[in-house]
Amino acid sequence: MIRQPHYLFGLLSVFWVVISTTILVADTLPAPSGQVVLTVSGEIQLTNVGDTAEFDLDMLRDLERTELETTTIWTEGLQHFAGIKLGTLLKHLGVEDGIINASALNEYFIDIPFEDADTGAALIAYERNGAPMSVRDKGPLWVIFPYDQSAHYRSEVYFARSIWQMDRIEIER
Ligand SMILES: Nc1nc2c(c(=O)[nH]1)N[C@H]1C(S)=C(S)[C@@H](COP(=O)(O)O)O[C@H]1N2
Ligand SMILES: [Mo]
C-alpha cells in the first residue's frame, strides 16, 4: 500500500515521455495555399497532400534561406542566387538517405546522389539577382551548384544535375 504513490509516479513519467516524444515527432507541414511549384514523393516522413509533400513558393521561402554568388555556363556575369539548400529541404522532410530523382516541367530528369544534399552544395534556387525566375527564365526552381568554388562542380556531371524548371523530386531507397 505504501508503495502505491511510487507506482503512480512511475506511470506518470512513462506517460510524459510518450506524450512529449509524440509531440516532437509530429512535426506538421501545412497545405500549400498558392500555386504548387514542387512536389516531393517517395521515402519521406512528412507529407501534406496524400503521400506527397507539396510546396508553394512562400512555403519554400519560409524555410532557411541560402544565398550563393557564382557564374554559370548558362548566364552572363556573376549571378546572385537565393533559395533553399536541397539538404535543408530533405532534412525538413525527415529524409536522411536515398537517391534523389529530380524531374522538370520539360520532362528532363536526373538522379542526384544524396551526397550533394549532405555537403550542402546543391541549392534549389527560387530567385536570381533578386527576382523570382519565370519558366522561360529556367524557373521557378533551378538547382544550382557552387561552380566558381571548385572545378569539381564545373563538370558535365554537375551541369547535368543543374536541373532547371524542377517541379518534382522522388526519394528512392
Ligand atoms: N530542365 C532541364 N534541365 C537541364 C537540362 C534539360 O534538358 N532540361 N539539361 C541538363 C544537361 S544534360 C546539361 S549538360 C545541362 C546543360 O544543358 P545545355 O547544354 O542545354 O545548356 O543542363 C541540365 N539541366
Ligand atoms: Mo548534359
Image (spheres, rainbow, N blue to C red):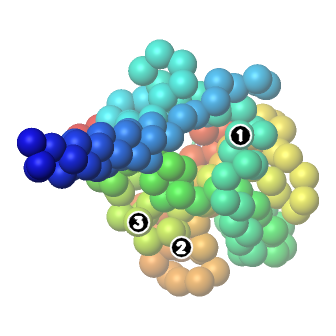
Cα separation, mark 2 vs mark 3, equals 19 Å
> Where does the image place residue 101, in percent across and percent down from the top left?
40, 40
**Labelled pair 1, 3 in contact (Cβ < 8 Å):** no
Q: Earlier in the sequence, mark 1 or mark 3?
A: 1
Q: Which residue is mark 2?
A: 154
- In this rendering, position of residue 37 left or right of residue 157: right
Give the residue at mark 1: 59
Q: Which mark sits nearer the N-terminus, 2 or 3? A: 3
Quick one: quadrant of the N terminus?
top left
Mark 3 residue crowding within 10 angstroms, few (<14) / some (14–19) / many (20+) = some
Q: Amino acid at mark 2?
A: Arg
Q: CA distance from mark 2 to mark 1?
A: 30 Å
Closer to the camera: disc 2 or disc 3? 3
The crowd level at tag 1 (other Cα within 10 Å; few <14, some 14-19, many 20+) is some
Identity, as a three-letter code, of the amino acid under mark 3: Asp
- From where the camera sits, is residue 108 visible? no
